[in-house]
Image: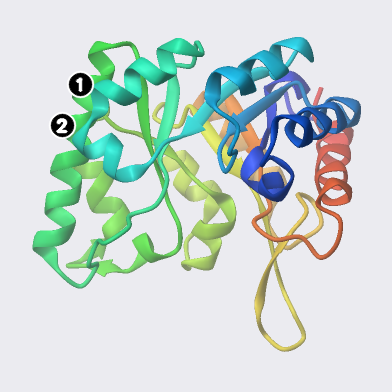
Amino acid sequence: MSSLRLDQVAIQLYTLRDFCTTVSDFTATIKKCHDIGYRAVQLSGVKVPPKEAKKVLDDHGMTICATHEPGDEILTQPEVVCERLASIGVKDTAYPWPGGIDFKSEESVRTLVKKLDAAGAVMAKHGIRLSYHNHGVELTRFGVTTVLDFIYREARPEHLKAELDTYWIQYGGGDPAGWIEKLSGRVPILHYKDYTITPEQKPEFAEVGHGNLDWTRIFAATEKAGTEWVAVEQDTCPGDPFVSIKKSFDFLRSTLK
């Protein structure tokens, strides 16, 4: 049994984005998450203003462990992001998606990394940790290595952390546990997301513990890495997403302390 605790498990609200468009819907969504057993959320994909969302979460005894903020704003207005996060008492956020980046261009990739490092430096001065959230595209080759290797080699650890996503690492041909081990001490939050393949040979998102990933190794690597939060996420679900997030939580409940 892993020594990770259930109170370190959050729900990534992007999974429930269609149910987070109004305050009333958001309130009902948070109640359902609390009833399942979640006690923390990552604020992402929510259209409710942050301060209103925090009030709802406070009312339900739920913690905001981290957020996703607009990528362009992180790179060009990190102080504004810091003010917003401070207003809701959050110290972790992530650059969510490399929009507009040409991964075939070395200059484009190098410019992104320089901007991430600079933004992370500003945010660190405000007590905010900036992480990079990967998808599969960062596993493309970059010289003798990959773009993801380059990002974490060139950006200083004190300025840029890692929000590794287990599904997308696998999708890109990487080893989720191996990447967590590689970035040990630099991974404050992980996205726990399972991976499966259909008979038509198409990769699909799966509930945690119901796909093909080696969770025994992932749990062990997570512990060694000193990760503080794991956020359950499923970009698309086969049916009711509340059923899917319960399946993921029930698996973790059966495994974690």
**SS for dot 2:** helix
In the rendered image, residue 213, in percent from the top left (x then y), is placed at 68, 57
Circles 1 and 2: CB atoms closer than 8 Å: yes
In the rendered image, residue 46, in percent from the top left (x then y), is placed at 60, 38
Which residue is nearer to you in this view: 22 or 168?
A: 22
Where, quadrant-wise, is the N terminus in this rendering? top right
Mark 2 crowd level (few <14, some 14–19, many ≥20, 10 Å Cα): many
Q: Can you tell which quarter of the image residue 125 is in? A: top left
Q: Is residue 180 visible?
A: yes
Q: List the residue tagged with mark 2.
A: 118
Q: Residue at x 78, y 53 (%)?
A: 207
In the rendered image, residue 228, in percent from the top left (x then y), is placed at 56, 22
Q: Is residue 158 visible?
A: no
Residue at mark 1 to residue at mark 2: CA–CA distance: 7 Å
Q: Amino acid at mark 2?
A: Ala
Q: Residue at x 25, y 21 (%)?
A: 79
Q: List the residue tagged with mark 1.
A: 122
Q: Can you tell which quarter of the image residue 191 is in? A: top right
Mark 1 crowd level (few <14, some 14–19, many ≥20, 10 Å Cα): some
Q: Is residue 192 above or below residue 35?
A: below
Q: Residue furthest bottom?
A: 200
Which residue is nearer to you in this view: 121 or 74?
A: 74
Q: Residue at x 74, y 44 (%)?
A: 19
| In-image side of 119 versus 167 (left or right) | left
Q: Amino acid at mark 1?
A: Val
Q: Is residue 36 above or below residue 5?
A: below
Q: Residue at x 19, y 49 (%)?
A: 112
Q: Is residue 112 above or below residue 59?
A: below
Which residue is nearer to you in this view: 13 or 117?
A: 13
Where, quadrant-wise, is the C terminus in this rendering? top right
